[in-house]
Image (cartoon, coloured by chain):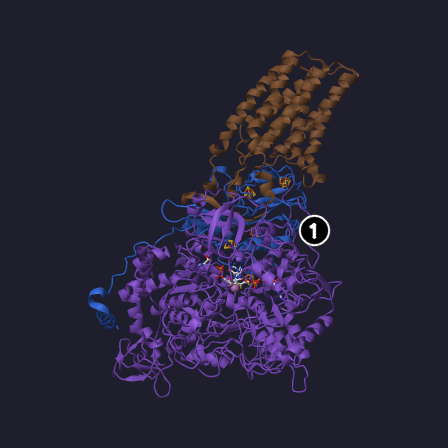
Chain colours: A purple, B blue, C brown
């Protein structure tokens, strides 16, 4: 006999120490345990106590160690020495870098602060970066939400005071039917997966509505392979069926929504607005007395069917609209690609789950009228949607349609339905409105972004032109709550609405995957005027890695990796709360940033604090001009937005106060001891019906979300939207330009409706829809520097449905030429059957520019990988008059990535994916060219 | 120890739920992360940032498309790692005794100190569960996280494989498939867990739970309209509707 | 399967080497002198050289001795023992042949048996693998044995046996190619059973688990060059069996002629062995939708 079974040490020491912080391989922000051996990261696992991920990690999070060791990490500030885009840089010291930045920024602030445009990409510190921009005084600040999913955010907030993702989540523990519209991965990456796991375990039914059946849609019990851009029709057809069958929650509608409110029928500036009493309160007709009463009067029983002085209720208006044949299943079947009987079946499933088996919790609660409810009755149908419905030019109204559907069946904020996460719900009125008036040397009077309630809130100059470089909050996209980052470079290049001097970008790969029409954007960034000056004179950029964007900046402020800095995931901006708890978190340097032999890297927020101090920005320096904060950690502890309310809610005051309290110097230590986060549970009786639940409202005030209770009604009928329609009809003193009147009249409909996405105008020459999806194991462009993840997704084939595959005689290994009105790409194809017949798609952002990310220029990402972005234009085709119409939702400015129409044909393999761009020299030593 | 031990009472293994796996690859990198610094040689990567990256992984996730007789094609994600076979051919072919099946719990392991890297065991495995590490020259395979599941330095709840601990959808289950009363055995019984390539006669311990049947809900009656809106008009509908209230 | 040059070299050379040693052991060589030295030397060189070549593909050749430990279960281990036994047992026979001196024929007989056992053991390394249905068949040991004997007969200049063996080899190769082509299907594994999804419907690969190559694909899913396999099969048969057979039948056995026949045969054997690997499909390929 040979060897004996060896003796194993089954209890090896795992590590020297565990440091608990927050992941940042994506915006989900899971808690991580970072294991350290001999001062190095040895292993990263999920933190079981963390509210977001409860111990699990995704593929990206679990390979974070490769992010921290990636050769692509920048090492020192860089100053451009060659032509822009050439990649020629010299390393400079931090003092030089900051002096240079100040020498550019200070004169701007003193003369024309709007000449600085500060836009941040995947920024998780927006309450801080916007505060900085506010102090600087430029109106030109936004993060990337405008090209990402503002339709989802705005559609939700304008309808129900919150949306999916950060704003709320399905009741995973109680839902019996879960319907997913247009989601591949979403931001709430792990919570959704945990949730789907729970549904599956309970045997709840999962339905996917998506042209593509992968991932979540793959595990869905049923799949509706809808034609892109037509979800609004499908949803409103479901509404049609439910209304027809009377399967809606009348009690809920009457109590908690503006369905019983009365719509002013009188021609004039008030037409289509809701009737109010002398105190400005909405009026409803009480069913007992038949009299009009304030909607929040105690004991009022709002009548959904009332007519008063010729004014009919919102309910009547909506029922009439959606009962019309326009929304009958037969009418929409062809367009949506969903047969009528399938639509009926889905409506029936929804009705059955909502009404035949309600979830009833024996929890007493009191509503805002003071009426007591013995139970919490829930409609266990939960929806979730993301960019599949929002990244279309009709996305705002489609998102509203979906919310209308879930409100009609009474499932929002009820057990088994959709639940808000604190600090949401929050009505439109509780949000700020945009501020844009700027003056030399002065801060902005308030935040840049917000929620307009009518034309009076638009960000216009006195001459009526857009005040902001991205034209946010202008007549082109009035409700652009997140700005339009995708328009910044094109507008700055065109000098429309005006020229700027310095473009300051943070964490956004704007010369590559986050731009439309990428090739043209690279040209804009390097284009010069007659005088030989760059049209965008100066570009400052902060990245942590050698991304494609680095080559296009004049000054690089290198950031640390996520394990090397302080960060604050704050209730003031994008928190990590769960429906049952408020929570916030920090990152802290579990590793020292060391870049031996180089000037080193600094946390960008701390650099901003430093710049603010050097520029003497209000809010950052006191009256004598002395710095208030040393660095970002200091700011996180000591900054107060309102007295007692700061970036972090936990361990305030003496360490025993949550939400409100004086700054506590030990706060960060307490966070670290607690695993990097703070959690505060919502009391049991406050966990549902939050917008109307007195107990919740009180709790929210105690935590500092707002200063007094703010109950509100869901707005099935949107007055802010109607106010823009009224303006388009000629009412009011702020008037849209004539060329936009017709469009505003059409799209600013106070009730959700469907219209054809603008992309359809490409016409019959471009018969195929083209989409992208997020791969679960890759984060935008920055996953490719990760040696493990790039083995999983090193190339991205273009998936082609069976009909087109056979129709064009494609075979494995073939390439195709794909043409849109904007451009042409030639790329490898692959066959997929579980796909809408008329849709092709690929994984997003796998394609890389040669030379970027410290990868071998022959890396598969650069030779076979490709971007669909070359086919998508940031402007719509000219419609005459030389006007530039952005490829965005006309309501919110959301970039319409998924409107894309193309034509596909077989092509000779060109050797590498086209278009191919020349390699850019790497600012860090690139990978050795060791090909096997 | 190339001979297989007598069948153990305890048969530790994984149960993978194909109805729930969304194909996120979390188990892939969690496995790589843990095993890169744990049992035996690290899982090396060649040409990591180069033109053809090539590394050792112990667990990989495929995506398949399945076309049923009726209804649209389905996409099923399929994680693949060592199944800790009872009749493990990878063990008996090994010339050095490096490859062995533990007598006490059935885990199939490689004693890397004895492995000559001949690759025979990988040839013998039908499931592609073994990869020869190009740097260390030794055979790597799923250890069932033997250095976690009994590890007294870990809290009790963490004594489970890294891939199971990280799986966000809870599609991976770990336990004793030799004990008919264990949670995993019950799951297998309930859901009809099956073996891969039974014709290879390897008798895998790991089981796969099939994807549930998909398609329209059974016996859904379409909604009956309250009344014919066309004939009664909107007013009639409204009356009828509000009566219910 | 990946046709690793070291393995092709090893199996072909050591096979021919042990074949030659077997013939020599059974008295096929001149009684003594330089010629005996050269022939025995060639036999030992081929056998030992082949064995050494086999260590080239090991990840850790320095531990190669451990491969002797598992003779109870492992064919590779048995091959090691059998080859050592053959080489050791034949050493006195060889010395006796070279330097003169009589050893009873039984010594050579036992040595020859171990030579052939070595070849059997080598072939069983492949034959035992259910995962490679083409190998997992009687044709594998038959081919290995016939190659070894043919090679041995040619190298030791045994005209009549060589001619007969060439004919047998040609027929066997044809049979192995033909029958081998059906083996994978007969073994019953397909993508449906590999994934267990066959119960749901027809299965196809949508996306591989990694877009780059890996060990499994390089080692077990070798598809490069298979498209030439029909031509290569002909070449293998012609070179390894037909040409040497014709030479033995029609050309007088001058040493040069024998040398030429041997070289041609070995070249053919290499081609056949390349095909033996390159055409062998491992069931793991099912997971990748390739074989
Ligand atoms: N075709 C198509 N294009 C799309 C989309 C689509 O669906 N289809 N989606 C769009 C959407 S929604 C989005 S959000 C964008 C995303 O696109 P981007 O916002 O450009 O996302 P990334 O590629 O991740 O780029 C972010 C940059 O941040 C850098 N970075 C990473 N970590 C750090 C850090 O710690 N500090 C600093 N300072 N920098 C860091 C990265 O190196 C990278 O250069 O893409 C858009 N583009
Ligand atoms: N792993 C990973 N996670 C990420 C990111 C990442 O890069 N990687 N990025 C983060 C960011 S910035 C964002 S914005 C989110 C986005 O998260 P998702 O909203 O999931 O975004 P996409 O991956 O773009 O997926 C859009 C989905 O909508 C579908 N779709 C497209 N058009 C339509 C349509 O008309 N109707 C319907 N019903 N479906 C349609 C597409 O098929 C696709 O499945 O993900 C975040 N999370
Ligand atoms: S989802 Fe993944 S990458 Fe994103 S924060 Fe969580 S673990 Fe990190
Ligand atoms: S972690 Fe879970 S869901 Fe993700 S691929 Fe692995 S088994 Fe599937
Ligand atoms: S799966 Fe493969 S490696 Fe694992 S025990 Fe079975 S045969 Fe051996
Ligand atoms: S590679 Fe190692 S474990 Fe596998 S058979 Fe060879 S010696 Fe045994
Ligand atoms: S049990 Fe451990 S070694 Fe095996 S696949 Fe899971 S993580 Fe990897
Ligand atoms: Mo996004």
Count of marks overlaid on the render: 1
Where is residue C28? Give x, y as percent: 69, 15
Q: Which quarter of the image is occupied by the C terminus of chain A?
A: top right
Categorize mark 1 by other alpha carbons within 10 Å: few (<14), some (14-19), many (20+): some
Question: On the rendering, which quadrant does ligand 1 occupy?
Answer: bottom right
Where is residue C49? Give x, y as percent: 72, 29
Specify the subunit that label 1 lies on.
A
Determine whether, in the image, residue C265 is placed left or right of residue A329.
Answer: right
Q: Which quarter of the image is occupied by the N terminus of chain A?
A: top right
Q: Is A890 situated above or below B123?
A: below
- State whether residue C177 appears in this view: yes
Q: Is A100 situated above or below A300?
A: above
- State whether residue A172 appears in this view: no
Farthest residue, direction left: B231
Element carrying mark 1: loop
Of residues A32 and A86, the one drawn nearer to the viewer in this rendering: A86
Q: Is A3 situated above or below A106?
A: above
> Which image quarter: residue B157?
bottom right
Where is residue A875? Give x, y as percent: 50, 64
Of residues B70 and B4, the one drawn nearer to the viewer in this rendering: B70
Where is residue A868? Give x, y as percent: 52, 56
Farthest residue, direction bottom: A278
Of residues C140 and A459, the one drawn nearer to the viewer in this rendering: A459
Ligand 1 within 8 Å, label 1 CB = no
The residue under label 1 is: A928
């Amino acid at each position: 006999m040979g060897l004996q079974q060896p003796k194993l040490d089954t209890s090896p020491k795992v590590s020297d120490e565990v440091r608990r912080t927050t992941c940042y391989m994506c915006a989900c922000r899971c808690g991580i345990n970072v294991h350290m051996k001999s001062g190095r990261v040895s292993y990263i696992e999920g933190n079981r106590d963390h509210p977001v991920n409860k111990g699990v990690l995704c593929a990206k999070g679990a390979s974070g160690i490769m992010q921290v060791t990636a050769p692509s990490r920048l090492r020192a500030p860089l100053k451009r020495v060659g032509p822009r885009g050439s990649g020629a840089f010299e390393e400079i010291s931090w003092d030089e870098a900051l002096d240079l930045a100040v020498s550019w920024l200070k004169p701007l602030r003193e003369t024309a602060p709007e000449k600085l445009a500060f836009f941040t990409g995947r920024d998780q510190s927006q309450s801080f970066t916007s505060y900085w921009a506010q102090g600087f005084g430029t109106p030109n600040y936004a993060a990337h939400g405008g090209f990402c999913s503002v339709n989802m955010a705005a559609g939700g907030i304008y309808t129900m005071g919150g949306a999916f993702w950060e704003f709320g989540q399905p009741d995973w523990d109680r839902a019996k039917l879960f319907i997913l519209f247009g989601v591949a991965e979403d931001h709430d990456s792990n919570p959704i997966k945990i949730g789907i796991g729970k549904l599956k375990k309970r045997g709840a039914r999962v339905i996917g509505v998506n042209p593509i059946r992968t991932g979540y849609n793959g595990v869905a019990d049923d799949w509706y392979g809808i034609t892109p851009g037509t979800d609004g029709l499908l949803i409103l057809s479901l509404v049609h069926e439910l209304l027809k069958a009377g399967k809606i929650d009348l009690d809920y509608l009457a109590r908690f929504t503006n369905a019983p409110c009365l719509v002013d029928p009188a021609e004039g500036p008030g037409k289509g607005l809701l009737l109010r009493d002398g105190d400005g309160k909405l009026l409803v007709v009480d069913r007992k007395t038949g009299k009009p009463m304030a909607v929040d009067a105690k004991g009022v029983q709002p009548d959904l069917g009332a007519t008063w002085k010729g004014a009919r209720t919102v309910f009547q208006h909506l029922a009439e609209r959606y009962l019309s044949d326009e929304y009958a299943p037969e009418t929409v079947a062809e367009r949506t690609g969903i047969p009528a009987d399938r639509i009926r079946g889905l409506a029936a499933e929804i009705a059955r789950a909502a009404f035949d088996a309600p979830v009833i919790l024996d929890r007493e609660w009191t509503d805002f009228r003071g009426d007591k409810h013995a139970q919490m009755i829930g409609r266990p149908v939960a929806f979730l949607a993301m960019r599949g419905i929002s990244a279309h030019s009709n996305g705002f109204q489609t998102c509203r349609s979906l919310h209308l559907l879930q409100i009609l069946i009474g499932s929002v904020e009820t057990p088994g339905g959709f639940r808000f996460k604190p600090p949401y719900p929050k009505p439109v009125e509780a949000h700020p409105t945009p501020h844009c008036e700027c003056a030399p040397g002065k801060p902005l009077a308030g935040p840049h972004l917000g929620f307009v309630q009518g034309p009076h809130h638009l960000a216009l100059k006195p001459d009526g032109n857009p005040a902001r470089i991205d034209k946010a909050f202008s007549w082109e996209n009035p409700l652009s709550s997140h700005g339009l980052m995708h328009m910044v470079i094109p507008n700055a290049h065109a000098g429309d609405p005006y020229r700027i001097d310095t473009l300051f970008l943070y964490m956004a790969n704007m010369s590559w995957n986050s731009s439309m029409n990428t090739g043209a954007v690279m040209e804009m960034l390097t284009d010069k005027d007659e005088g030989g000056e760059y049209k965008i004179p100066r570009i400052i950029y902060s990245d942590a890695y050698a991304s494609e964007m680095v080559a296009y900046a004049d000054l690089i402020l290198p950031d640390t990796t996520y394990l090397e800095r302080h960060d604050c995931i704050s209730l003031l901006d994008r928190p990590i709360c769960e429906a049952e708890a408020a929570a916030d978190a920090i990152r802290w340097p579990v590793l020292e940033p060391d870049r031996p032999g180089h000037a080193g890297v600094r946390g960008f927020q701390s650099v901003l604090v430093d710049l603010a101090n050097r520029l003497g920005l209000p809010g950052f320096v006191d009256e004598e001009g002395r710095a208030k904060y040393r660095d970002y950690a200091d700011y996180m502890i000591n900054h107060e937005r309102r007295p007692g309310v700061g970036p972090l809610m936990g361990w305030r005051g003496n360490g025993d106060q949550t939400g409100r309290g004086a700054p506590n110097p030990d706060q960060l230590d307490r966070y670290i001891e607690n695993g990097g986060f703070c959690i505060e549970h919502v009391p049991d009786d406050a966990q549902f019906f939050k917008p109307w639940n007195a107990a919740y409202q009180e709790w929210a005030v105690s935590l500092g979300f707002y200063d007094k209770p703010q109950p509100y009604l869901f707005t099935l009928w949107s007055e802010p939207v109607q106010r823009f329609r009224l303006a388009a009809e000629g009412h009011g003193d702020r008037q849209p330009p004539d060329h936009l009147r017709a469009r505003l009249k059409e799209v600013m409909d106070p009730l959700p409706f469907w219209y054809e996405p603008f992309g359809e105008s490409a016409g019959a020459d471009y018969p195929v829809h083209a989409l992208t999806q997020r791969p679960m194991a890759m984060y935008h462009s920055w996953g490719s520097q990760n040696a493990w993840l790039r083995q999983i997704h090193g190339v991205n084939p273009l998936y082609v449905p069976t009909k087109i595959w056979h129709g064009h005689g494609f075979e494995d290994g073939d390439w195709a030429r794909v043409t849109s009105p904007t451009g042409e790409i030639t790329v490898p194809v692959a066959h997929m059957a579980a796909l809408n017949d008329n849709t092709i798609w690929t994984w997003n952002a796998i394609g890389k520019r040669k030379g970027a990310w410290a990868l071998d220029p022959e890396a598969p990402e650069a030779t076979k990988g490709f971007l669909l972005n070359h086919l998508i234009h940031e402007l719509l085709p000219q419609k005459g008059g030389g006007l530039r119409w952005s490829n965005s939702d006309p309501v919110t400015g959301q970039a319409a990535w998924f409107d894309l129409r193309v034509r596909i044909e077989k092509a000779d393999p060109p050797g590498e994916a086209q278009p191919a761009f020349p390699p850019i020299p790497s600012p860090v030593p690139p990978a050795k060219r060791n090909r096997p | 120890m190339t001979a297989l031990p007598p069948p153990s009472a305890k048969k530790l293994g994984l149960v993978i739920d194909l109805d729930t796996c969304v194909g996120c690859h979390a188990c892939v990198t969690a496995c790589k992360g843990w095993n890169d610094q744990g049992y035996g040689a690290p899982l090396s990567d060649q040409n990591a940032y180069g033109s053809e990256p090539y590394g050792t992984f112990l667990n990989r996730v495929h995506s398949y498309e399945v076309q049923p007789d009726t209804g649209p094609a389905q996409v099923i994600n399929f994680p693949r790692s060592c199944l800790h076979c009872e009749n493990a051919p990878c063990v008996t072919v090994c010339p050095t005794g490096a490859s062995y099946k533990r007598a006490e719990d059935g885990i199939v392991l490689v004693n890397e100190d004895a492995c000559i890297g001949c690759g025979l065991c990988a040839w013998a495995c039908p499931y592609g569960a073994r990869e020869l590490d190009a740097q260390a020259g030794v055979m790597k395979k799923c250890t069932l996280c033997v250095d976690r599941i009994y590890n007294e330095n870990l809290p009790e709840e963490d004594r489970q494989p890294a891939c199971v601990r990280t799986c966000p959808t809870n599609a991976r289950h770990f336990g004793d498939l030799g004990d008919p009363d264990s949670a995993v055995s019950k799951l297998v019984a309930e859901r009809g867990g099956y073996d891969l390539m039974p014709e290879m006669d390897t008798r895998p311990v790991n089981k796969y739970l099939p994807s549930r049947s998909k398609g329209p809900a059974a016996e859904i009656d379409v909604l009956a309209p309250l009344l014919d809106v066309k004939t009664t008009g909107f007013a009639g509908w409204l009356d009828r509707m509000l009566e219910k209230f | 399967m990946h046709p690793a040059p070291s393995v092709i070299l090893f199996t072909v050379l050591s096979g021919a080497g042990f074949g030659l040693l077997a013939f020599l052991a059974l008295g096929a060589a001149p009684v003594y002198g330089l010629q005996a030295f050269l022939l025995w030397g060639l036999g030992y060189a081929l056998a030992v050289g082949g064995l050494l070549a086999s260590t080239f593909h090991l990840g850790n050749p320095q531990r190669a001795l451990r491969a002797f430990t598992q003779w109870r279960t492992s064919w590779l281990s048995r091959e090691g023992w059998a080859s050592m036994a053959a080489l050791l047992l034949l050493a006195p026979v060889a010395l006796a042949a070279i330097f003169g001196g009589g050893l009873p024929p039984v010594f050579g007989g036992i040595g020859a048996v171990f030579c052939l056992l070595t070849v059997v053991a080598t072939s069983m390394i492949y034959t035992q693998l259910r995962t490679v249905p083409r190998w997992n068949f009687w044709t594998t040991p038959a081919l290995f044995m016939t190659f070894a004997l043919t090679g041995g007969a040619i190298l030791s200049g045994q005209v009549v046996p060589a001619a007969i063996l060439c004919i047998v080899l040609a027929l066997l190769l044809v049979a192995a190619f033909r029958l081998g082509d059906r083996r994978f299907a007969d073994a019953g594994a397909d993508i449906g059973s590999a994934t267990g999804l066959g119960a749901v419907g027809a299965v196809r690969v949508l996306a591989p688990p990694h877009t780059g190559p890996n060990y499994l694909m390089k080692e077990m899913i070798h598809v490069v060059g298979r498209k030439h396999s029909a031509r290569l099969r002909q070449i293998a048969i012609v070179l390894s069996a037909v040409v040497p057979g014709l030479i033995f039948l029609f050309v007088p056995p001058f040493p040069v002629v024998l040398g030429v026949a041997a070289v041609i045969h070995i070249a053919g054997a290499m081609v056949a062995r390349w095909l033996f690997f390159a055409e062998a499909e491992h069931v793991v390929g099912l997971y990748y939708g390739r074989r």
